[in-house]
Image: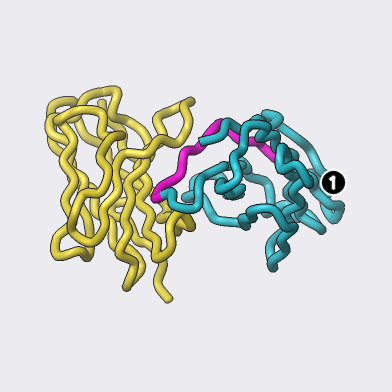
């Protein structure tokens, strides 16, 4: 699986967009980008995933660069409840499980 | 729809004792996973069931850990005998379409 690199921490003002970057320069053609988050004392929660096209759902948007070597998770209007550790994970389409790295601690400030 | 349920939410035991953690997956999910997070470390994969069969147990730390999944429904993870380094949060997850996983809230295990 391709290795991912994320900043260890970020702050965002409440109500503003939170943009969380992830580098995955060694990603291969059949590997997807998954985003999960873990809110303190809860289990990890799926957010979104994509292969090459940008994706949007009710929680977030995922922007993948054309060369697929990096991506950005966008929370359009961050709230205090979005404070969590965000994990960017690259896995092949046939993968059966996930490997978590150290993620990005996002703190949404009032 | 009920989510993944784990019991107990907290367990405090002494070194050398036995503890059994239980996980009830989302109904209809054939895939069931165990993960754990030891203090200060990353979330680590332990094992993966497909129905009642162990698909991948490469993450199990040693033979003190035994996981079972009776009839492809709920799963148990037994630690016997528990050691201090087993303390951490044990997460269970289930999935219908891996690797989109649904996680439970975890069991906080403290070994004293």
x then y, percent, for residue A60: 72, 59
Residue in front for this viewpoint, B45 or B12: B45
Query: Where's residue A22, x and y in %?
Result: 70, 37
Mark 1 is surrounded, within 10 Å at the Cα level, by few (under 14), some (14 to 19) or many (20 or more) other residues, namely some
Q: Is residue A108 visible?
A: no
Q: Which residues are magenta?
A: A96-106
Q: Colour of chain B?
A: yellow
Relative to A11, is A106 on the left or the right?
left
Q: Quadrant of residue B60?
A: top left
Residue A55 in magenta stretch = no
> Where is mark 1, residue-wise?
A13
Residue at the far bottom: name it. B1
x and y, in percent, of residue A7 in the image: 71, 30
> Quadrant location of residue A24?
top right
Tell me: A84 left or right of B36.
right
Q: What secondary structure characterizes most of the magenta part?
A: loop
- Residue drawn at x 82%, y 48% is A110
Q: Give the total of numbered labels.
A: 1
- Residue at x 68% of width, y 62% of height: A59
Is residue B44 in sight in this rendering? yes
Quick one: which chain is cyan? Answer: A
- Of residues B58 and A26, the one drawn nearer to the viewer in this rendering: A26
Image coords of residue A92 (percent x, y)? 50, 47
Residue A1 vs residue B48, the one in the foreground: A1
């Amino acid at each position: 699986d391709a290795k991912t690199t994320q900043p260890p921490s970020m702050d965002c003002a409440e109500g503003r967009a939170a943009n969380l970057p992830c580098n995955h320069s060694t990603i291969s053609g059949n590997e997807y980008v998954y985003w999960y988050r873990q809110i303190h004392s809860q289990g990890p929660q799926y957010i979104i995933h994509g292969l090459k096209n940008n994706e949007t759902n009710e929680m977030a948007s995922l922007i993948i660069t054309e060369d697929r070597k990096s991506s950005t998770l966008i929370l359009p209007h961050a709230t205090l409840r979005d404070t969590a550790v965000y994990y960017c994970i690259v896995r092949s389409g046939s993968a059966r499980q996930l490997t978590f790295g150290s993620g990005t601690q996002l703190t949404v400030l009032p | 729809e009920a989510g993944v349920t784990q019991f107990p939410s907290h367990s405090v035991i002494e070194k050398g004792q036995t503890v059994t953690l239980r996980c009830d997956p989302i109904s209809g999910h054939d895939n069931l996973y165990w993960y754990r997070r030891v203090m200060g470390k990353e979330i680590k994969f332990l094992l993966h069931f497909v129905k009642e069969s162990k698909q991948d147990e490469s993450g199990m730390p040693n033979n003190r850990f035994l996981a079972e999944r009776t009839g492809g429904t709920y799963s148990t993870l037994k630690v016997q005998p528990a050691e201090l380094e087993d303390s951490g949060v044990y997460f269970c997850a289930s999935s219908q379409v891996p690797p989109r996983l649904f996680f439970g809230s975890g069991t906080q295990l403290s070994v004293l």
